[in-house]
Image (spheres, grey):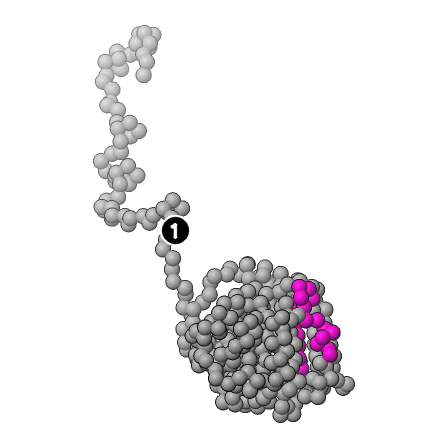
Amino acid sequence: MVWRVSDWVNMSPSRRFKPSKPSKPSKRFHGPSKSSKPSKRFHGPAKPLKPSKPSKPSKRFHGPSKSKPPKRVRVRGGRLGVLNLSKSPLLARSERIRLKSRFATATTVVEEVPGRPKAVLSVVIPYYRAGFIGWVPFESLIRQEGVNFNWELIILEEGFDNPFGYKRMVAYWDRLKAVGCCRLKYIQLKQWLPLSGKWYYLIQSIDTNSQVVCFNSADIYMSHKRLAAQFKILSKPEYNWYKLNGNLVYDIGSDSHVALRSLARGRADTCCRAAKSGLVKKLPLVWKKRSVDTWMFKALRGRAGNRIRFYYDQNGLEKDTVNITGLNNISHKRAARVRQVAPPFRKCCASLESHIPLSVVKRLRRSRN
């Protein structure tokens, strides 16, 4: 407080010499009073602090953590299966869109007997650059025996790059009808499709009444008992997959053939396999170019909850089932193993004519030139 001289003069003597009361200390400058509790803000909590956990290293600067093993999920049937997380849902969706857009431009030609009979068995064959070898399955189909039911044949191939073509297929139509074929469907693609997409659309194109689907390739001569034997077995409720125990392999370049024996129960990617249509219709639409047969079996096994019931061939179909090497577009390394009789092949003592018709053997040998 500032005193002026005029205030001192005008003040009464009693007040002028009276001592003033001591002022209380300011809380603002001297801190809180003793009765107040200590501030947690400045003095910290009463209890001692617990030691903090060490922080994890940043993935951004120190690199990602170690890769984790794939998740294992329990599927129907009680077994543990590995969940494939290799493709994101967005990538899988974009691949399906691309496959659908390519198939949308395809054209279909159908030949069928009058009355639109119902086919109970479907033979599906994907073709690719099969201009020189595409006749082989037709020669085996027109020689089928014991067929007392209606069946259909569906071919899917690109209409470019050395196709077999519709004209050469329809030339077999009369002979196919003589052995029970009621429908020949030819699907011509204008854009290339991977093999996984071809299998998917072949399966989706079968007759709604079809009960059995027989898979074949453009370079495989099938047994003359195949359709009758596979339809008889797969008509029973206890089986849904027909597996051959092996086949013959013929190399055109060296004019030699060997035998292949396959008894692996974990694999079903053998030639001339067949399955019930209700099972194979569960095949997903996926963009895949390599190891498609193995992938297809594993995909169907997963969709079926590991409930694939095999029938291992006991009708001797492997004795006259021949896989041709030399005019196809895959398995280029197989020819060298056939010539050397390297595993998994073994030597076959009988001549090729003892397994398949001589006219077919002569035509194969003429194709060497």
Residue occupying the point 65% across, 80% down:
138
In front of the other: 61 or 350: 350
In front of the other: 187 or 322: 322
Residue 232 seen in the current view: yes
The location of residue 22, given as percent across then percent down, is 23, 23
Which image quadrant: the C terminus? bottom right
Residue 278 seen in the current view: no
Q: Quadrant of residue 134?
A: bottom right
Which image quadrant: the N terminus? top left
> Which residue carries the number 1 mark?
64
The location of residue 258, given as percent across then percent down, is 49, 79
Q: Most extreme residue toward the right, as rendered?
A: 114
The location of residue 105, given as percent across then percent down, is 70, 64
Tell me, yes or no, whether the highlighted magenta stretch contains residue 158. yes
At label 1, counting other C-alpha atoms closer than 10 Å, the crowd grade (few under 14, some 14-19, many 20 or more) is few
Residue occupying the point 45% across, 67% down:
83
The location of residue 5, given as percent across then percent down, is 32, 7
Report the span colored magenta. 152-171
Q: How many marks?
A: 1
In front of the other: 249 or 102: 249
In the depicted structure, whether residue 29 falls above or below residue 194:
above
In the depicted structure, whether residue 285 falls above or below residue 58:
below
- Please state which amino acid type lies under the numbered disc 1: Pro
Tell me, yes or no, whether the highlighted magenta stretch contains residue 256. no
Q: Quadrant of residue 26?
A: top left
Residue occupying the point 22% across, 18% down:
19
284 to the left or right of 15: right
In the depicted structure, whether residue 58 falls above or below residue 224:
above
Circle 1 SS class: loop
Residue occupying the point 58% across, 88% down:
225
Q: Quadrant of residue 194?
A: bottom right
